[in-house]
Image: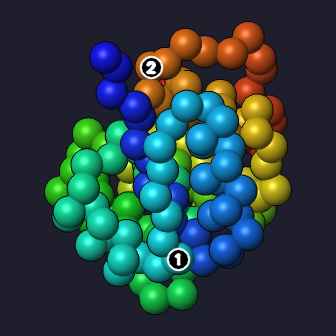
Amino acid sequence: MNKKIHILVVDDDSSLRTLFEAILGNYGYTSESTDNGREALSKLARETYDAVLLDYSLPDITGLAVLQHIQQVYPSVPVVILTGHTDEQVAERAIAAGARACLYKPFDCVEIEKVLKDLLGTPSLQTVIPERCCILS
């Protein structure tokens, strides 16, 4: 029996968290979500995740601080940064800090699925990565 891939979604937008849970469920993944960085760190300490979808801008601590903690304590867990900032420096900072990919909001389901399949080694779609999505090889 195959273990389902388990993903943590960290975003302060409740609509987006709900959407992610639905999308991830449709792809056969399980997920949990939280709206802040401190709770994300607490969840990471209690549970094992295969990947983290992490908002760059959180209300309590920055997504970058959460990413740096994940890199130090859970270096094998890939992190995808989610951001509404169109400034390329945000993606550059996130990738430099250890993020494996950066998705710019708004994004679509194909982008999410492609990034997760590439990062988690699950069978990939036959699609081209959209230009508003950057992936670290």
Query: Residue 132 occupies which quadrant of the picture?
Result: top right
**Measuring 34% from the left and 20% from the top, which residue is drawn there?**
2
Q: Secondary structure at mark 1?
A: loop
Q: Is residue 96 visible?
A: no
Q: Position of residue 127 (x, y in %)?
A: 77, 17
SS for callout 2: loop
Graded by Cα atoms within 10 Å as few (under 14), some (14 to 19) or many (20 or more), the crowding at tag 1 reads: some
Label 1 sits on residue:
35
Direction from residue 2 to residue 121 in the image, left or right: right
Q: Decide: is 58 above or below 100.
A: below
- Considering depth in this image, is 6 or 107 the residue closer to the camera? 6
Task: Identify the residue at horizontal 27%, vertical 72% (top origin).
Answer: 42
Residue furthest to the front in view is 1
Name which of mark 2 and mark 1 comes first in the sequence. 1
- Identify the mark at residue 66; answer none if there is no mark: none
Q: Residue at x 31, y 17 (%)?
A: 1
Q: Is residue 77 left or right of residue 108?
A: left
In whole angstroms, how far apart are the C-alphas of marks 2 and 1? Answer: 27 Å
Residue at horizontal 67 percent and vertical 49 percent from the top: 22
In this view, the residue farthest toward the bottom is: 60
Q: Residues within 10 Å of mark 2 (few under 14, many from 20)?
A: few
Q: What's the amino acid at mark 1?
A: Asp
Q: Is residue 58 visible?
A: yes
Query: What label sits on residue 121 in the rendered view?
Result: 2
**83 vs 28, nearest the viewer:** 28
Which residue type does callout 2 highlight?
Gly
Instruction: Check the image and report above or below for 60 versus 131.
Output: below
Q: Nearer the viewer, mark 2 or mark 1?
A: 1
- Here the colouring is rainbow
In the rendered view, does 71 fall on the left or right side of 121? left
Residue 117's x, y, as percent?
55, 25
Give residue 60's position: percent from left, percent from top: 46, 88
